[in-house]
């Protein structure tokens, strides 16, 4: 009997933000994944040999359609996914240009004020990243 694969799954993502085109207030982007029916920050598994920051920006582009400029590195989250340890590195990232097109992985995105974004996130562990984003932008 072979032992289960306990190799840590390496992933990366961003807490994507922008200034509202309407009132200039900070908004955080959340993605809805129909496969899990959840709301989360854009993130995904790294490709073999891929730099974590490059992977985070690739995932943002793939999941949201936006290009972004990264800022501070945010706390890394560790948790079990399908029984395997997973490590997700995150960065604050300001959306620059782009537009969302629904795809098989992400069918909707929302731009929400920080409090609403924190409340909409499915996983409690993801909520701490919103506070970390605000701290990194000196908005706390």
Image (cartoon, rainbow, N blue to C red):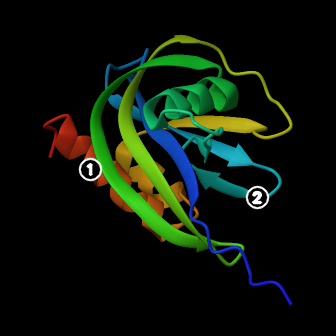
Percent x, y for residue 95? Answer: 45, 20
Callout 2 secondary element:
loop
Instruction: Find disc 2 in the rendering and name its residue.
Output: 37
For residue 49, what is the image quadrant? top right
The image quarter containing residue 91 is top left
Front in this rendered view, residue 13 or 2? 2
**Residue at the disc numbered 1:** 132
Q: Residue at x 16, y 39 (%)?
A: 139
Q: Is residue 25 visible?
A: yes
Which numbered tag is attached to residue 41?
A: none
Marked residue nearer the N-terminal end (2 or 1): 2
Of residues 15 and 18, the one nearer the viewer is 15
Residue lying farthest front? Answer: 1
Q: Is residue 30 left or right of residue 125?
A: right
Placement of 110 over or under 57, stated as above or below: below
At 50% from the left and 41% from the top, the residue drawn is 13
What residue sits 70% from the left and 73% below the top?
5
Q: Quadrant of the N terminus?
A: bottom right
Front residue of 2/81: it is 2
User: Which x, y percent locates residue 83?
Assistant: 68, 78
Comparing labels 2 and 1, the label whose residue is closer to the camera: 1
Q: Quadrant of residue 3?
A: bottom right
Q: Residue at x 47, y 38 (%)?
A: 52
**Residue 35 position within the rendered picture, expressed as x and y whole percent measured from the top left:** 83, 55
Q: Residues within 10 Å of mark 2 (few under 14, many from 20)?
A: few
Q: Residue 12 location, x and y as percent?
A: 51, 44
Distance from Cα at disc 2 to Cα at disc 1: 25 Å
**Relative height, residue 81 to residue 70 (above, below):** below
């Amino acid at each position: 009997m072979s032992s289960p694969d306990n190799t840590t799954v390496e992933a990366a993502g961003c807490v994507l933000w922008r200034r509202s085109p309407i009132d200039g207030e900070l908004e955080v982007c959340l993605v809805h994944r129909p496969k899990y029916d959840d709301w989360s920050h854009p993130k995904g598994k790294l490709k073999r040999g891929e730099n974590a920051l490059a992977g985070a920006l690739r995932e943002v582009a793939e999941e949201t359609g936006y290009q972004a400029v990264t800022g501070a590195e945010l706390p890394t989250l560790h948790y079990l996914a399908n029984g395997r340890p997973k490590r997700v590195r995150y960065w604050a990232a300001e959306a620059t240009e782009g537009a969302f097109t629904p795809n098989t992985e992400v069918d909707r995105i929302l731009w929400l004020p920080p409090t609403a974004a924190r409340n909409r996130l499915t996983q409690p562990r993801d909520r701490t990243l919103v506070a970390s984003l605000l701290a990194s932008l000196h908005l706390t």
